[in-house]
Image: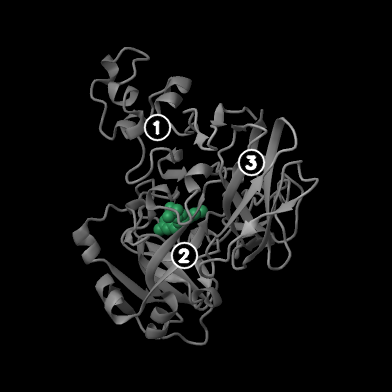
Amino acid sequence: MELENNTFDKSNQYVHSGKEAEPMGLTSRRSFLKTGSWSAIGSVLCVPFVFEKHSPAGLIPVQIDFADEQIGIPEKHPDLIILNDRPINAETPPHLLDDFTTPNDRFFVRNNGIPPEVSEIEANNWTLSIGGEAAKQEKTFSIAELKSAFRTYTYHLTLECGGNGRSEFNPPAKGNQWRTGAVGCAAWTGVRLKDILESVGYTDQAVYVGYYGKDTHISGSDQVVISRGIPMSKALQEETLIAWAMNGEQIPQLNGYPLRLVVGGWPASCSGKWLSRLVIRDKIHDGPKMKGQSYRVPCQPVAPGIKVADKDMCIIESMPVKSLITYPRTGATIRLTQRLPIRGHAWAGDLEVDRMDYSIDFGQTWKECTLSKPINKLAWQHFSATIQFPETGYYEIWARATDRSGRAQPMVIPGWNPRGYLNNACHRIAIKVV
Ligand SMILES: Nc1nc2c(c(=O)[nH]1)N[C@H]1C(S)=C(S)[C@@H](COP(=O)(O)O)O[C@H]1N2
Ligand SMILES: [Mo]
């Protein structure tokens, strides 16, 4: 791992050298310089590049050369790492996740298709219909009706993509090569899914609730992009919300404006965006990305690289225990006379994190961190520690969370699985002590 030239000055202030994380998509000048390809230039400029064929080879359009910072995705921090620009998928570098509550512009984006463009007028006319074979009736609500007819709740809920950390699996798994940043914890405001389900009524045959959203398929066909669901027990959990606000503001367009499901602690694919319909099912929901190998892992551990039959794959439910060091940034340099404060977050799906440790000797010894209680169930927790290094040299700080059931994060990559889900290996950062 290459060390960046970051230092702590005398007052122990963190000084950053200016070397930024390298975006992996096509939407930056740097990646253009690397690939020399403008295949995605239209999407970079957001308008057609009219005289592209007259542009001398290798000439970088001024818009991109001098406005690198402005090229990003709407409503999002320019330093999100873009993994794919059609559909848009972008993750948050660890140091941008340092806030207790993830700000809207830093919250990752995982789109399977093309999001609807929803104006304020369309949001005012937005409806949520509820039906399905186990519903006692078909009902439709406007957002205003949801707001006025039901009690409103706000919860901090951790959302992590099932594929977060996929990039480390070997043999590699297809799909977005998420590193550590497909996770965030925001304060979501809305109504309880439970209250809506009870107002509609459901039979004793009800086993699952599935969602449908208004995004469209990348091919332009009217195929449903994704329609996943959750068992009744999770749907009836008090913290499972139908939300219209994120951190007290409108939900960003890319994160599901004007209405989305928020199912904390489970793969974020359960949290349907641009929510327009719910179905109360008398069987496990069978929409796109519920079946086959999607969001499933082998029911029994398998050897890396092996093909697993669909019938031997099980649906992912609660996410595993995990943590992230959000300060300092990897590559920092500190003087031996200084003590290094570290901090970050830890979460464990449906469970609480019980204990947080760090190691500076590659896992031979561990020291306990200070760990906060979650602000509410299914919210991430915060940890901190202060490290005194014994001598100069290269160190790695490893962070390891342990959940209520006694399960701890693995130090190496956990069980390989065909789609590269659930990598909850310890987060590591590099520190140079001089
Ligand atoms: N309608 C719809 N809902 C969706 C998706 C989608 O593509 N379309 N992606 C899912 C997946 S796989 C994830 S990880 C989360 C990501 O939520 P975010 O983009 O707000 O971070 O949304 C989920 N809900
Ligand atoms: Mo996801």
**Ligand 1 closer than 8 Å to label 3 CB:** no
Q: Is residue 24 above or below residue 157?
A: above
Q: Residue 7, labelled with which disc?
A: none
Q: Residue at x 50, y 58 (%)?
A: 159
Instruction: Kindly indicate the quadrant of the structure image that contains residue 256.
Output: bottom left
Q: Which image quarter is the N terminus in?
A: top right
Q: Secondary structure at mark 2?
A: strand
Q: Nearer the viewer, mark 1 or mark 3?
A: 3
Give residue 277's position: percent from left, percent from top.
37, 69
Q: Earlier in the sequence, mark 1 or mark 3?
A: 1
Q: Residue 339, labelled with which disc?
A: 3
Judging depth in this view, the residue of 72 and 279 nearest the camera is 72
Disc 3 marks a residue whose amino acid type is Arg
Count of numbered circles on the image = 3
Judging depth in this view, the residue of 199 and 209 nearest the camera is 199
Q: Residue 27, labelled with which disc?
A: 1
Q: Nearer the viewer, mark 2 or mark 1?
A: 2
On the image, numbered disc 2 is attached to which residue? Answer: 156
Q: Which image quarter is the C terminus in?
A: top right
Q: Disc 1 to disc 3, how far (Cα)?
A: 39 Å
Q: Residue at x 34, y 54 (%)?
A: 252
Judging depth in this view, the residue of 90 and 408 nearest the camera is 408
Q: Earlier in the sequence, mark 2 or mark 3?
A: 2
Give residue 288's position: percent from left, percent from top.
48, 59
**Callout 1 crowding tier (Cα within 10 Å): few <14, some 14–19, many ≥20:** many
Q: Disc 2 to disc 1, how far (Cα)?
A: 32 Å
Disc 1 marks a residue whose amino acid type is Thr
Q: Earlier in the sequence, mark 2 or mark 1?
A: 1
